[in-house]
Amino acid sequence: MAVTNRKGGTGKTTTAVNLSACLAELGNKVLLIDLDPQGNATISCGIPMSDEDGGSIALLTTDKTTRELSCVGPVANLTVVPSGSALAAAEMELNRKKDWERILRTKLKAVTDDYILIDTPPAMGPLTLNALVAADGVIVPLQCDYLSLEGLREFASNLNRVRANLNPNLSLIGLIKTIYDERPLLTRHVAAELDRYFGAKVFSTAVPRNVRLAEAPSYGLPITLHASSSTGAGAYRQLARELQERLN
């Protein structure tokens, strides 16, 4: 599953990390791949940033496998392929390789984990395209504001192009309302528009605006370890269960 949104600040990495941790907590074997040069998912898991010989950089540029490049995650059943700033330079070199859009897809064929989540950069470049070609489905975290709603139009167009040219089996698993505060009228209006246009594709679980969620990355921990009884942890646990039911 590619966790993606071309707009930054939507809780994309927070969702990739905490959804991975909660799926692992349910007893699933989970692989989280950090495909963003900023390495925020890596940091949020308390793992050092990789250099050019390791992590997702080497995954895309060498013959090394996910097994060779993954690190033990912060919770049982979770492994992480970390990222590093050198991935930005590697991204510029990707399109010189043959079938560069399918590099990640080829690498993941041998992976047997129950779930693979891929955290992507907030842009439709070679890294995100590799994730979309490799994925069976897409999860889109978004805030309920006007710009997020407008950005969905372009995202839907990009998704259709990927389906038409590179990955016909790619599906939209669902949209997640993140950093959610239902008090503002605009938030309620955008949420209603999402439900009207996307219907059952919108997860019923919304992730609230939560201080504990915001501070967890600074401790290098998923929310389930940093503040297990917080509303943020409860939301992601509920979301993980809803995702499992949806996929089953």
Image (cartoon, grey):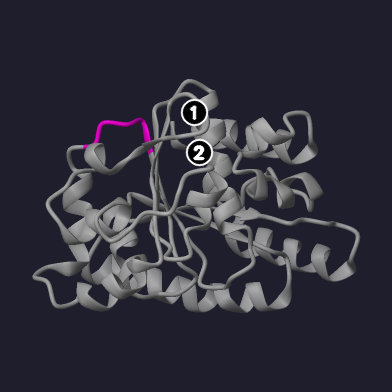
Q: What residue is rendered at 12% in x and 72% in y?
A: 97
Q: Which residues are magenta?
A: 111-115
Label annotation for residue 184: none
The quarter holding residue 160 reads bottom left
Q: Neighbour class for label 1 at 10 Å: few (<14), some, many (≥20)? A: many
Badge 1 amino acid? Ala
Instruction: Indicate the secondary structure of the residue bearing disc 2.
Output: helix
Label annotation for residue 20: 2
Residue bearing mark 1:
24
The quarter holding residue 99 reads bottom left
Residue 200 percent coordinates (x, y): 59, 49
Q: Neighbour class for label 2 at 10 Å: few (<14), some, many (≥20)? A: many
Tell me: residue 10, above or below residue 31.
below
Which quadrant is home to the C terminus?
A: top left
Residue 76 percent coordinates (x, y): 48, 24
* Circles 1 and 2: CB atoms closer than 8 Å: yes
